[in-house]
Amino acid sequence: MAQSSQTTHFGERTVALEDKQGLVNAVFHGVADRYDLMNDLMSGGIHRVWKDAMVADLAPPKSGSRPYRVLDMAGGTGDIAERIINASVGYAEVVVSDINSDMLRVGAERAKSWRYPAQASFVEANAEELPFANNSFDAYTIAFGIRNVPRIQQALSEAHRVLKRGGRIMVLEFSQVDVPGLDSFYKAFSDQVIPPMGKLVTGDAQPYQYLVESIRKFPTPEAFTGMLATAGFKRAKHTAFSGNIAALFSGWKI
């Protein structure tokens, strides 16, 4: 079967659209067991503060007349799901979904030691074609995963489809530093420190070279907020964190 003529980026490389997912999968299969450790090292632990802020903004309820269901997409290792469940004192039910089986393996193993392990389930799925019914979740979260999706707009449309009316999407993603001085330091750190650190910790620098490059290819905050609106989300907005190193995007299905 002939390949399509559509292309996209894989870091700085231009690749066939249908090839990107396999390349991304290979990156995360290789780093799954040390993914969270590398996040701590790369960010100095501040990614935990950003994730805590995301869950605080979501403010999952602690009780109600029906289950509060969350789809945490690209959430393989479960760190967002655990935060949501704990914040709801075990009320929220979180489906952790990821296209990468190794990431899910790590998350499912860790969940055994959580305070509320029964509130999480782990499902292998593609963000562009979710195996869930329309209007089946109260919230959709994705942290540092949307930029790895080949067809981002399609994934956002799928998020809108599976959310109930009144449901909320929350996207935490790296952004484009806009503080003079910090921008040049951040670029130098990204180029000169992160890939060698990745090689030291995981044995391979290439996945972290890709991650650095993929951040730079991600749409601007204004453009991504527009993509949320195109997918049907209302009151789409973004909040910058740490000089816009990261940004939290949100919108509502109304």
Image (cartoon, helix red, strand yellow):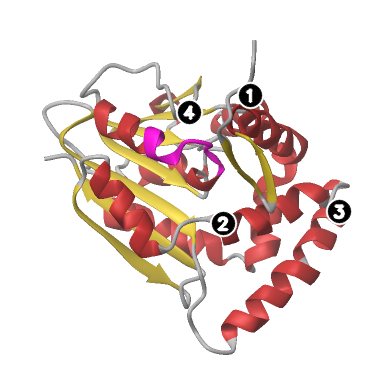
* Front of the two marks 1 and 2: 2
Q: Earlier in the sequence, mark 1 or mark 3?
A: 1
> Label 3's element?
helix
Q: Quadrant of residue 183?
A: bottom right
Q: Which residue is mark 3?
A: 199
> Label 2's element?
helix
Residue 92 horizontal/vertical position (percent): 30, 34
Q: CA distance from mark 1 to mark 2?
A: 25 Å
Q: Which mark is residue 97?
A: 4
Q: Which residue is mark 2?
A: 217
Which of these two is toward me, 219 or 40? 219
Q: On the picture, is 174 further left or further right than 132?
A: right
Q: Earlier in the sequence, mark 4 or mark 3?
A: 4
Q: CA distance from mark 2 to mark 3?
A: 22 Å
Query: Contact (CB < 8 A) between labels 1 and 2?
Result: no
Three-letter amino acid code of the residue under disc 4:
Ser
Q: On the picture, is 164 further left or further right than 184?
A: left
Residue 59: tell me if it is visible.
no
Q: CA distance from mark 1 to mark 4?
A: 10 Å
Q: Which residue is mark 1?
A: 101
Residue 202 horizontal/vertical position (percent): 83, 47
